[in-house]
Image (cartoon, rainbow, N blue to C red):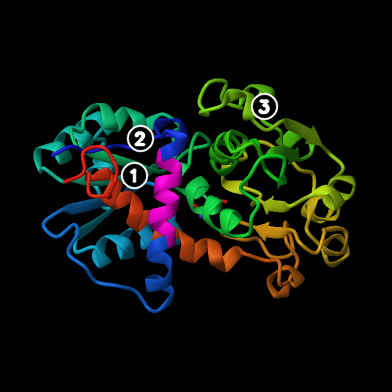
Amino acid sequence: MSYRSLLSILDLTPGEVNQLLDAAASYLPRIEAGGFKDATLKGYSALLLFYEASTRTRSSFELAGKMLGMDTINIGAKGSSVEKGETVRDTALTLNAMHHNVVVMRHEAPDAVALFARYFDRAVLNAGSGRGQHPTQALLDALPLRQAGVLQRSKRIAIVGDLKHSRVMRSNLQLLTSFGLDVVLVAPPTLMPEGWEGLKPAYWAADPTGYGEVSWSTDFDRVLPGLDAVMMLRVQRERMGDAHITNTDEYSKLYGLSRRRLKLLPESAVILHPGPVNRGVEVGEDVFADPRCLINDQVTSGVALRSALLCWSCGKLEGTDGQA
Ligand code: NCD
């Protein structure tokens, strides 16, 4: 049986991304109708190993696993042997000896999931590694973008907010530019990641000349009218050791998606946010009532995408290598 791990977006070929999105799209109607039950992964186990807080990611993986017939087991940092000083390597070796089929892992250190995967023989799915990567979020974001006709060359998306600490931005930037979208990063200088110019992968897409451009602006008002999509990100206070923003009101005035700014965004554009949302900071109340808002669609898409991904990781997705 062949297993596949997903540590970063670059572990997938562009063809596989499309295959996963197609599979997720086919799960979507069944999930919207209240869920499904099949036996595709009956007899398989998924261990959800979350060292950081999560609502959407963990529960959507668990729901997807259960709908596919998997046995799902939850472990958090609290109550695990990590509290007793066990290392990531020893945790991986221990869980490997239990023969779990899939480990879905979130950790605050950017390299911890990749380290774990070195000592685990079956599938490891990265559910968020510090400020490093969050590949399943980028994939689930791509689904509503594709359905809105935005996932294509020359479309323009802004990713706005705390980019310095954002794994969501890093994975999305790789995925979106490879589909040929131009990405405008909008953030104050203190929340821009160092070396942002180098974040675009140089080699991954089937047609490297088709990569979208990446630029940076501090002027949200000027960027808004030219957009096909805007992705708002949370101000991640838990990752800020020092003062990156002087005050939340000031930040919100300059970078929040307010009622006034909604008017600057084209009618045809769409609004994304991975959640959790700080209402009144990066998005105003009006965003949720706006017909362009796809925030809830992203959550549903998460269940569909993770259903497809669990099948893929166990070689059970039709048309992929190692199909069972
Ligand atoms: C994000 C995460 O944890 O990286 N949320 C998520 O997975 N839906 C973004 C965030 O925490 O702001």
Residue at x-position 47% and y-position 66%: 300
The disc placed on residue 113 is: 2
**Distance from the alpha carbon under mark 1 to that under mark 2:** 6 Å
Q: Is residue 150 above or below residue 125?
A: below
* Residue on which the image places disc 3: 196
Q: Measuring from the top left, give residue 250's x and y in whole percent.
A: 84, 51
Bounds of the magenta segment: 16-25
The disc placed on residue 260 is: none
Q: Give the side of residue 216 with respect to residue 47, left or right.
A: right
Q: Measuring from the top left, give residue 85's x and y in whole percent.
A: 26, 35
Do labels 1 and 2 touch, CB within 8 Å?
Answer: yes
Q: Measuring from the top left, give residue 110's x and y in whole percent.
A: 45, 32
**Distance from the alpha carbon under mark 1 to that under mark 3:** 26 Å
> What amino acid is at disc 1?
Met
Determine the image quadrant of residue 154. top right
Given this view, does label 3 or label 2 mark the residue nearer the observer? 3
